[in-house]
Structures are given as C-alpha cells and as structure tokens.
Amino acid sequence: MNSRRDRVLCLALLLYTGGAASVAQEPLTLRQAIDRALGQNPEAAVAHADGQEAKAAASLARTQLLPQLNFTEDISRGDDPVYVFGTRLRQRQFTQADFAVNALNRPQPIGNFSTRLSGSWMAFDSFKTQREIRRADLFKESASSSAKAVDQQIVFHVVGAFQSVLYAQREIDVAQHEQETAAALLTSVDDHVKAGLAVESDRMSAQVNVAARKQEMIAAQGDLELAWAELGEAMGATDLKATELEPIEPHTFPQQPLEQEIATAAKTRPDLIALGQVQSAQASALGAAKSDFGPRVSAYGDWEEDRTSFAGSGGNNWVAGVQISVDILPMGKRAQLAREGAAKQKIDAQLAALQQHVRLAVSQAHIHRQTATLSLETARAAMDQSAESLRILKNRYGAGLATITDLLRAEDAERQSQSNYWHAVYGNAMAYAELLYATGTLTPDAAEELQ
C-alpha cells in the first residue's frame, strides 16, 4: 500500500515539475528581440508595403509593351437618318427602297446589335517605354534598399533598448551590493558606538547612508521598468513580459582605420544605395521625357458584326492600319522635360549631401568608438582603486584612524565607480553598434556580437 502511494506521489511530482518547466520563461536573447521587432514593428510593415507597391509599379510599366485588346457588345435603336442609313449598310440590309427620298429623310426606327473586337499596339515610341520600365525597376530596387535601411534602424533601436535593460539590471545589482555594504557599515558603526569607540553622530550618518542606498534601489527598479517598456516599444510588442536577461559583460570589439570604415559605408549604407538608385531612375525619367519628342509608330485593328437581333445574322466588317505620329508643337512635353531635369538636379544635390552626412556620421561613430574603449579601461582601473581604497578606510576606521566622513566618502566613491564602470560597458557596446549602423553593416547577425 505504501509503495503504491509512493508511486502516485512520484508521478504527481514529475507532472508538477514538468509543468513548471514548461511554464518557465526562457531569457530573451538579443537575436530573438531583433527577429520579433522585424516581424512586428509597424515601420517594417510600411517599408514592406512600399516594396510591394514598387514591385507592382514595375509590372505595370511592362504592360505598355503589350497589345491592347477590347471587346464591346452594343445595343442601340434610333431614327436618326445618318444612323439608320449607316446601320442598314453595316447590317447588309440596304435595299433599293431605302433610296426613296421620304425613307431617307424620315426613316423608321431601327435597332442594332453590334459586336466589336478592337486592338492596338505601340510598335515604336522612340524607346520611351523601355526607359520608363528601367525607371520603374530602379524604383523597385530603391524600395528594397530603403526597406533594408528601415530594418537596420529598427535593429539599432532594439540594440539600444536591449542594452539599456542589461545596464539597468546591472544598476540593480550595484544598488543591492551598496545596500548590503551600507547595512554592514551601519552594523560596524553601531558596534563602535556601543564600545565607546565612536559617537552617536557616526551612527546617524550611517543610518542616513542606508536610507540613501534604499532610495537608489527604488530609482534603479524604476529605471529597469522603463527600460523594459522602451524595449517593448522598439520591438513593437506591447505585451512584452520582463524576464531576467543574461548579465551585461564587457566586450572587445574589432577596430578598423577610419578611411576603411568610410569606404565600407559608401558601399553598404542602404539609404545611400537607395538614393543612388533613385538618381539612376530619375536619369531614366529624363531620358523618357526626351524620347517623348520622337516619332511614334502604332498598329491598330477593328472587327465588327452588326445584326438586327441578338442571335440573328447580319454583316461584318474589319479595318486595320499602321499610324505614324509626330508632335509638331510639343509645348507640354518641353515643360515636362524641364521638370524632369530639375528633379534630376535636386536628387544629385541630395545624394551629394547624404554622402557628406554619411562621412561625418562614420567619423563621429569612429571617434565615439575610440573614446568608449578608453573610457572603459579608465573606469575599470578606477573601480579597482576605489574598492581597494574602501577596504583600507574600513580597516583604518576600525582602528580609530579615520572618521565616519572619510569612510562614507570612500563608500560613495566605490559605488559611483561601479556605476561608472557598467555605464562604460554599456557605452562601449552602443558605440560599436553606432559604428555598425553608420557603416550600414548592422545586420541581425552582426548585432549578436553585442550580447
């Protein structure tokens, strides 16, 4: 009986632990946050829609090369003399009696069922259509490059928000450590007061220090909640739940010469590539406006059957031809050409301005990267020194060789140095992310180096 009860208890324990394991939420990784943002962020959806619109426009431009074919079924009735005369001829129903003067002037109403097939084809338009197709294709490629630029912007925002959460978690750890340090210091001071080695004001100063550390913990918890909210907004996930992430750690990132980074940006920046493609598209639009001055050659054809009733018999006719046309007074086309030329000059200037902006952005990111590396090294050394200074002052206070003011000042310096160090770790990671973003290489795979 007992063995059966033991088996039941074991089974219940396994089910409980298995269910708890399935409910437990795995820590969110940076790559998961990026993938979710790219799938849910509204800006990514807008960029995707722009790409689909440009793709449809490219397909629409190609339809100009295809022949146009129309079918028409027309039902009419009237007694207009010209209408009656022409309809009888088309129906092959014209007789000698229809030449009577009275019949010509005052004909009886007649009905007509007309079936028509008509078609046309632009055989040659001085290559205007080909240039418009080229323009649409370039706009499609530009939309794709712009979507990549939006993706990198989203990745950059997610990286920043994710790093803010990691930094806020470290601030919680620092605040917790400082609370413990302040509590231990209060205990030590209390012992000294009881032993007559310190005065009551020392204990009051230590108590104030404990209260200050509690306030810092409250502020750090608020900063963490805010960081999670910002991460949820960057991901486009309003239902994001806070979890314990892997702690932020210092990283050593690769460095390259500035000119090499600028050259990389010129080749890989998606927004720069997109505007360059728009420039080429506008050049094609300018060429199409020039082609519009040239001659056009088109072919057309028309077949028609006319009947007295829907299912009856009647006559049919057809006509086909080739048309050559030249605009001898192209005032509107000249205005269009001037407009496309001005648009081309504008895009050329925009591209030159963006190239200068990219060069400046890469230079700034390169300097920030170097500064962040040096700041991290300095912050690490300062943290080690402040920890050693606090240890020494604790021993001196215990021996009655230092005041409570000296000890609290050292404790505050040690706390500040820890906060500065983790802020430097955060700044180093963000400076590298800024450099990747400035050079156009901040892909989801590259961002994984930051965790």
Image (cartoon, helix red, strand yellow):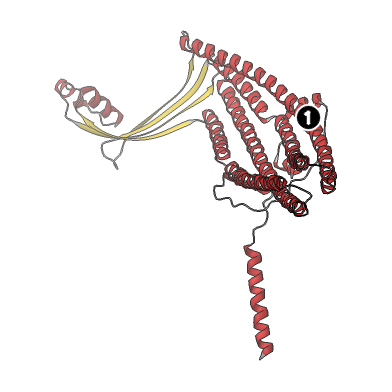
Closer to the camera in the image, 187 or 203: 203
Q: Quadrant of residue 420?
A: top right
The mark total stands at: 1
Residue 264, visible in the rendered structure: no
Closer to the camera in the image, 147 or 418: 418
Name the side, left or right, on which 389 lies relative to 44. right
Specify few, some or many for label 1: CA neighbours under 10 Å numbering under 14, 14-19, or 20 or more. some
Closer to the camera in the image, 277 or 374: 374
Residue 151: x percent and y percent? 63, 37
Closer to the camera in the image, 185 or 417: 185
Image quadrant where one finds the N terminus: bottom right
Name the side, left or right, on which 394 lies relative to 301. right
Residue 279: x percent and y percent? 63, 21
Q: Quadrant of residue 345?
A: top right
Residue 334, visible in the rendered structure: yes
Residue sitting at 78 percent across and 29 percent down?
371
Residue sitting at 70 percent across and 29 percent down?
269
Residue sitting farthest toward the front:
196
User: Does 101 sit above or below residue 22?
Assistant: above
Residue 140: x percent and y percent? 60, 31
| Numbered disc 1: secondary structure | helix
The residue that label 1 is drawn on is: 371
Residue 118: x percent and y percent? 41, 30
Residue sitting at 72 percent across and 52 percent down?
183
Please, what is the three-letter code of the amino acid marked with disc 1?
Thr
Residue sitting at 63 percent across and 72 percent down?
16
Image quadrant where one finds the C terminus: top right
